[in-house]
Image (cartoon, coloured by chain):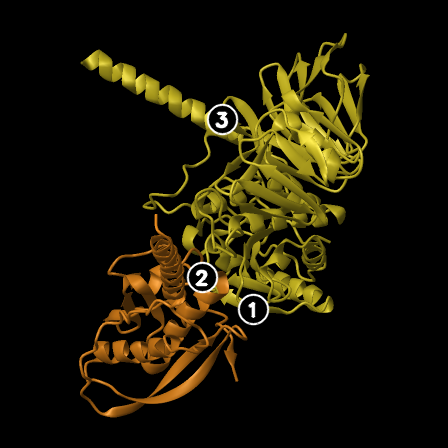
Chain colours: A orange, B yellow
């Protein structure tokens, strides 16, 4: 092998090694990039109706209490749709980036059925329960905030039941009982911050 | 073809029964302060125990898997085991195990034969293992007893060195005492008596329990005295038939619930179960791992460790307590409620763990109150309604004791099973880490402080903890 060929071979080997190192660095950089989260929330149809002041009971993990907060939102005339829209407003607080009580991405309320004058059936989607954090406090905060928000905005509604994808579920995420009705008139209620 | 089906069915049945039997084995561990049990697992025909389950009640124990290595830290002593290897390093010294170490789903399993050698490197004090009987005694824990026959009345008086609370059952010509939680020891063997009523006694140990079998020539009755240190076995006295005093009936099971346990069979009902004042329910278990508190810490393991610690704290105050599960086994919420209600405790506590915030949360059932009616059945779904007054008083007392120790605590009502189904004063306790660090949940000092506060709260509950008329009163 001539000296020139040797030099050319050495340069090629160095180039291959440098390219390999560069490719490895690029791969590592790509792995470190955060995966862009898809917003799996269903697109809500435009709400037509007068703007109304509603009361939300917003759960807070920080103090383990519910915080009463008023909001002005457009609400449809149909009572069931109105109830659903109020709950979706509540959930939108939990789906914000710096939420006081984060819920899993895609959590939504599919339907609210007002069965009897004093009873509401809330049908949540699978993401609502499947992505929910597990623990007595975090689960009970979610259930109590939904129940007390409905009770505050639907006068006379005292018994609330939560279904998931139209089916009864034993617990929300291993703790809070979803098999029973939540009675907003029963004895002591979940603490509300003043 | 038909006979082939039969062969397959029989093989499956044998496999199922073998698997079930294997799961039932447990090692009983006794210390001067506490008792607990751990599962004994079969691996390649050898018996293994989960090392972390053994160590957690004895001190601060954490473990993590690093590839095929299993690194253990117990009371600041570091140890390292390797999956499939017999060599282990404990406190910088080598130890040869009798069989290869096994990592099973993140759990480190040591051969039962080597457990004593492993513990002697980690835990100070004397230790004695009765391996065939699956009983391990740490720190000289042992309850001795003497038997004294009083021929005049055909009585056998058993004096124990510490209080005991065995399960007692009778069958034709025999009275059987099972000591599942007490470190009762005696030389194995049979002693014959020259008596018409008490004919002999046999002591044996097996499957993590001690058994004292009394052979009798007439129906006998066991009675306790001297704060459960003395058991007197005497012939059943002749009594006139008498109407039983009215007492509140247990809650009726839901007729349509597919998961509801079957009512107790008459034979089982004849077994005299010792009455525990407090029933502790370690939340979750088996396939139900509960919340994933960290990458390696499951809620079911934390609740069991805390439950054992709470039982020890209660027993230190002289309050008998029992666990609904003392191993990693699964129970449905209906089963938990049925077992607890059958034990007729004064207090029921279900333990959970979480990572939202810090400190302790004490919960009572989110139910409407209802007035108890003596002698009537209670609805299964709302049995707790009749006991809410006592439950709230109990929660208040526990909260006050925890507050006194300057640990963050709050209380709230929750919809939680089996709390709703319990016919006794009942609370749920959710333990959060002392600070942001989840590992604090396994800290022995934190467990000790919180459990002591809960025990003090139970003992100091100002109201009677049982509401219905005719039922026993409070703890004091």
Q: Nearer the viewer, residue B337 or B235?
A: B337
What residue did someone put label 1 on? B357
User: Which quadrant of the rendered structure holds the N terminus of chain B?
Assistant: top left
What residue did someone put label 2 on? B415
Are the residues at dot 1 and dot 2 in contact (C-beta closer than 8 Å)?
no
**Label 1 Cα neighbours within 10 Å, binned few <14 / some 14-19 / many ≥20:** many
Query: Which of pointers 1 and 2 indicates the residue nearer the eye?
Result: 1
x then y, percent, for residue B172: 58, 15
Instruction: Using the image, name the chain to which the residue with label 1 belongs.
Output: B
What residue did someone put label 3 on? B22
- The residue that appears at 63% across and 61% down in the rendered structure is B394
Q: Is tag 1's residue or tag 2's residue first in the polypeptide sequence?
A: 1
As helix, strand or loop, the secondary structure at mark 2 comes to loop
Image position of B42 with respect to A87: above or below: above
Asked which quadrant contains residue B399, the reply is bottom right
Q: Nearer the viewer, residue B18 or B283?
A: B18
């Amino acid at each position: 092998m001539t000296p020139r060929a040797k030099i050319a071979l050495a340069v090629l080997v160095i180039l291959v090694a440098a390219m390999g190192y560069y490719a490895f660095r690029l791969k590592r950089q790509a792995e470190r990039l955060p995966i862009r989260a898809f917003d799996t929330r269903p697109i809500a149809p435009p709400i037509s109706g007068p703007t109304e002041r509603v009361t939300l009971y917003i759960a807070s993990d920080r103090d383990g209490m519910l915080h009463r907060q008023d909001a002005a939102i457009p609400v449809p005339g149909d009572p069931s749709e109105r109830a659903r829209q109020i709950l979706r407003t509540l959930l939108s607080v939990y789906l914000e980036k710096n939420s006081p009580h984060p819920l899993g991405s895609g959590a939504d309320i599919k339907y609210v059925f007002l069965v009897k004058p004093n009873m509401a059936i809330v049908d949540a989607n699978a993401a609502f329960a499947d992505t929910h954090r597990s623990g007595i406090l975090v689960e009970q905060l979610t259930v109590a905030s939904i129940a007390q928000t409905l009770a505050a905005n639907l006068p006379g509604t005292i018994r609330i039941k939560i279904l998931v994808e139209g089916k009864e579920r034993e617990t929300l995420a291993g703790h809070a009982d979803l098999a029973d009705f939540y009675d907003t008139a029963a004895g002591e209620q979940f603490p509300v911050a003043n | 073809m038909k006979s082939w089906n039969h062969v397959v069915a029989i093989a499956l049945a044998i496999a199922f029964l073998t698997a079930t039997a294997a799961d039932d084995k447990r090692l009983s561990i006794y210390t001067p302060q506490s008792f607990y049990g751990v599962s004994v697992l079969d691996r390649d025909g050898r018996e293994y125990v989960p090392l972390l389950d053994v160590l957690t009640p004895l001190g601060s124990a954490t473990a993590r898997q690093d590839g095929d290595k299993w690194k253990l830290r117990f009371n600041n002593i570091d140890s390292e085991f390797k999956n499939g290897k017999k060599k282990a390093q404990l406190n910088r010294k080598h130890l040869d195990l009798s069989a290869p170490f096994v990592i099973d789903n993140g759990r480190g399993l040591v051969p039962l034969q080597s457990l004593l050698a492993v513990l002697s490197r980690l835990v100070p004090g004397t230790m004695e293992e009765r391996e065939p009987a699956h009983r391990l005694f740490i720190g000289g824990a042992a309850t001795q007893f003497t038997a004294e026959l009083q021929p005049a009345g055909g009585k056998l008086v058993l004096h124990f060195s510490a209080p005991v609370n065995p399960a007692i059952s009778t069958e034709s010509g025999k009275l059987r005492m099972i000591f599942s939680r007490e470190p009762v020891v005696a030389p194995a063997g049979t002693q014959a008596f020259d008596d018409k009523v008490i004919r002999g006694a046999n002591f044996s140990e097996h499957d993590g329990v001690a058994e004292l079998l009394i052979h009798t020539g007439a129906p006998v009755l066991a009675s306790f005295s001297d704060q459960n240190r003395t058991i007197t076995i005497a012939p059943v006295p002749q009594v006139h038939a008498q109407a039983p005093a009215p007492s509140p009936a247990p809650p009726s099971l839901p007729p349509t619930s597919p998961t509801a346990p079957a009512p107790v069979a008459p034979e089982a009902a004849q077994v005299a179960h010792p009455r525990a004042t407090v029933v502790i329910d370690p939340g979750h278990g088996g396939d139900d791992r509960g919340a994933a508190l960290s990458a390696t810490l499951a809620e079911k393991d934390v609740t069991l460790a805390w439950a054992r610690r709470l039982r020890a704290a209660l027993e230190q105050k002289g309050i008998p307590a029992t666990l609904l599960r003392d191993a990693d086994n699964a129970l449905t919420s209906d089963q938990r409620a049925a077992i607890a209600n059958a034990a007729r405790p004064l207090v029921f506590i279900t333990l959970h763990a979480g990572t939202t915030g810090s400190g302790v949360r004490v919960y009572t059932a989110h139910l409407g109150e209802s007035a108890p009616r003596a002698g009537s059945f209670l609805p299964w779904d709302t049995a707790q309604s009749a006991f809410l007054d006592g439950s709230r008083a109990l929660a208040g007392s526990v909260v006050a004791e925890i507050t006194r120790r300057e640990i963050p605590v709050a209380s709230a009502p929750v919809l939680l099973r089996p709390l709703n189904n319990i016919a006794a004063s009942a609370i749920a306790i959710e333990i959060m880490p002392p600070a942001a660090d989840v590992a604090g949940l396994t800290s022995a000092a934190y467990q000790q402080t919180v459990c002591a506060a809960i025990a003090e709260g139970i003992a100091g509950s100002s109201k009677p903890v049982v509401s219905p008329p005719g039922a026993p009163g409070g703890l004091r």
